[in-house]
Image: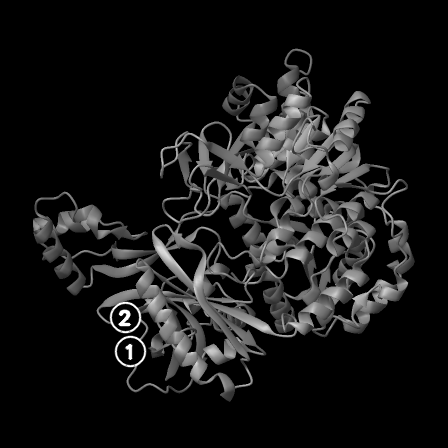
Amino acid sequence: MKYAEIALDVPPSIGASFTYTIPDVASRFVRLGHLVFVPFRTRVVIGIVVALSPCSAVANPRAILRLALKAPLLSPIQLQLAFWMSRYYRISLFRTLIQFLPPGYVFRKGKYVRSFGITDPTLTKHQSALLDSIPKTKWIPVVKLTGSNPEGASLLSDLSQLKAMGLVDTVDQIVDITVTPKFDDHLSLTQLGKEAFKKGLIDKFRTPRRFQLVQELALVGFPVPKSELKVRYRSDILKVLEAKGYLLTQKLRQNRVPAIQNDTCSMQVLPTKASSATWEKTEMVFSKHGNKFLPMLIKGGSPGENREIYLALIANCIATGKKALILLPDTLSVDQVFCDCATRFIGQVAVFHSGLSQGQQYDQWEEIQKNKYTVVVGSRSALFLPIKNLGLIVCDSEHDWLYEYDDVLPSYNAKKTAAKLAELNKALYVMSSVTPTVETYYETQGRIYPPPSMENESKLFGSNGAEIIDMRLEGADRISTIISARLRNALRECLQNGGQAALLLNRRGTAAMVYCRACGYIFRCVTCDYVLIRQSGFQLYCNNCRSRETYQDRCLSCSSQNIVDLGTGTEKLKQEVMSLFPEITVMKWDKDSAPGIKTQRTIAQEFQRQKIDVVVGTQMILKGLDVSSVSLIGVISADIGLQSTDFRSTEKTFQLLGNIPRQLKDIGTNISLIIQTYQPSHYAILGGLRKDYESFYNREISDRQKFQLPPFTKIVKVSRVATDSYLAREEIMALSRRLRENLGRSRDISSIVGPVPSHPHRFKGRYKWDLLLVGQDPNRFLHRYKLSSNWIVDVDPVSVF
């Protein structure tokens, strides 16, 4: 007898599974990765087979009922990765596993019924009618049969009898496949049509359009989607040819191809000068490390140079018969890198990200599973694709913090997960960045390519250098409180010469804070206590829970009308530019104005066509904008990130500024760069503009070691969430006392910080308290303690408080 470990959608301890017996009749069908129906307490639910064993540690386990789907959906490597993610990030194994399922597979709970397609002559009239209303091919909710029926109780009784007789099946959970392959009408020539074309029976002078259609189908030689032909030919032409028996209509599979795969990339990819010197050496690097898990860092002089190096690695990977995966932090970056790859590896590149429709994601997933593509370009979710024979994983723009985005559950670090996936596949793992994170640069010492000694880049930006404007020296009588006189003059000169400009301010809205001068009251979100920012018009917006409130002209505390806006954002910057230059076209580009990929592409295309004179936005514009036509780039408040209490704030500021000159280096043109700041001598600002990563790193790593911060330690943030702040505080205090009792007994943990109220303290009516565990392996230390679902554990958090 065989046994299976099944992961279920129930709240067990992290990583736990349940043991079930595999019936002898099904032993040769059940495989790893199968979805199966199993009994759990009084219900029948769906589980995922994660392990098979000839013996069981559990006495008298219950048996698997049947397969939920015919084919297994997860590979052994995907199961291993899911086990690791579940344990490392302390998330449910089942919730981790469903990330690997095809797009459109949704688990639904409730009572569902399906007919076996057989009948019984002994059934009553009511039972026969009920059985006829139950489909054979799909599950339907029982509530659809009984919901509004006055005889609902009687129907439930009949349903129970039908189940006892073996005529229907009922379960308490199903997998609902919301997307399926698309089938469209396709047209091709019949044998009669081919003969008519050969014999010239279709007059190309009297009926030229009919002749052109038949000629096109004859030359193509395979069925063409009818929808495509309708774009070029009138419907009556198709109907006439069909009536004559010349055309054959067939329902065939139609792949929903992403728009970018249909677009022809006009850009020709050529090696840059800096990468040409190292081009030949990439083959040596790959042959040396290609069969070993050995993380490497590509740190060239610009993003374009880095890309050329890893494209050469991909070419070598394909030559060895293996596949490559390229990870990008956002969808706009995916589009750009896909274009580079598609021009080099024609017809071999797939694309996968959240900007695709669910149907497009499904078709891409299926074709990747069928080994149609050798290169996959995608965002974080591409880690869960069924890529077989993986030989190379590239993490481009390694410094981008979107890889560690924790607003969506399950929360995980895509870079660390990619490293584990490479290890399981025995593949080469390469990270690419011109301003890598301090942790990555420290951990890849000796595996940086090209070596730091080979770097030969100018310490100055362009030929004219970047101008740093000390905003402390701006006069009190200046026209604008946001734009300095120098930037205003440069902007005027740029526009007079027909150029375009980009102004970057890494804060959204009109004002960072709205407060009352009379009593000091600050307007906050009613659901999460977050400080509200002023948007255009009379709107107050919460960046945390995204709720909106009406702008008040009176203080809610003292009724004073002395309400003022503090700080600035992209909306206010746009208004300032429009007031200074009312005749130009200004577009705002941030998460508020361009939340989706379609809007972002539209703005980028409009700017490229020079229909926009000035674009104002957050750091999103650096990723999606074609800066080849930009004459001026202005950074407003370059030190805005330095005000944060996050220990990584200086690093993020350096990365933001350090990537601007390197991106412009790829273009090869002189572009004016003006930086406004109140801290012109700060080492993060100067180091970023001088492209002096080594000096910045040496200072930063010294501070990290002094204060025992990553990479010298690891951090785990434990949070307690409750509707009562006092309850959350008391429970996290109790946990803190338990943890501190073992503080000196384990080498895994060196200090505990907190508990303290989270920022923001309240979110959607629930209060949150945080506790930080710092040490060599605080995650392993925390695994000794069982925590309920009311606790949130964030391993390697992006921000600590």
Which amino acid does the dot numbered 2 rest on? Pro
- Residue closer to the observer: 201 or 728: 728
* 2 and 1 marks in contact (CB < 8 Å): yes
Task: Report the residue that reaches farthest toward the front.
Answer: 518
**Residue 226: horizontal and vertical position, in percent?**
54, 30
Q: Is residue 390 visible?
A: yes
Q: How is the image coloured?
A: one colour
In screen coordinates, is 693 left or right of 377?
right
Marks 2 and 1, how far apart in space? 7 Å
Q: Quadrant of the N terminus?
A: bottom left
Which amino acid does the dot numbered 1 rest on? Arg
Q: Residues within 10 Å of mark 2 (few under 14, many from 20)?
A: some
**Residue 114: horizontal and vertical position, in percent?**
26, 55
Q: Which residue carries the number 1 mark?
A: 62
- Under tag 1, what secondary structure? loop
**Residue 73: horizontal and vertical position, in percent?**
48, 63
In screen coordinates, is 186 left or right of 738?
right
- Under tag 2, what secondary structure? strand
- Residue closer to the observer: 706 or 507: 706
Q: Which residue carries the number 2 mark?
A: 39
Please give the label number shown on residue 279: none
Q: Residue at x 65, y 38 (%)?
A: 262
Q: Is residue 72 above or below residue 747?
A: above
Q: How many marks?
A: 2
Q: Residue at x 82, y 22 (%)?
A: 497
Q: Is residue 602 visible?
A: no
The quadrant holding residue 172 is bottom left
In screen coordinates, is 359 left or right of 259?
left
**Residue 754: horizontal and vertical position, in percent?**
46, 69
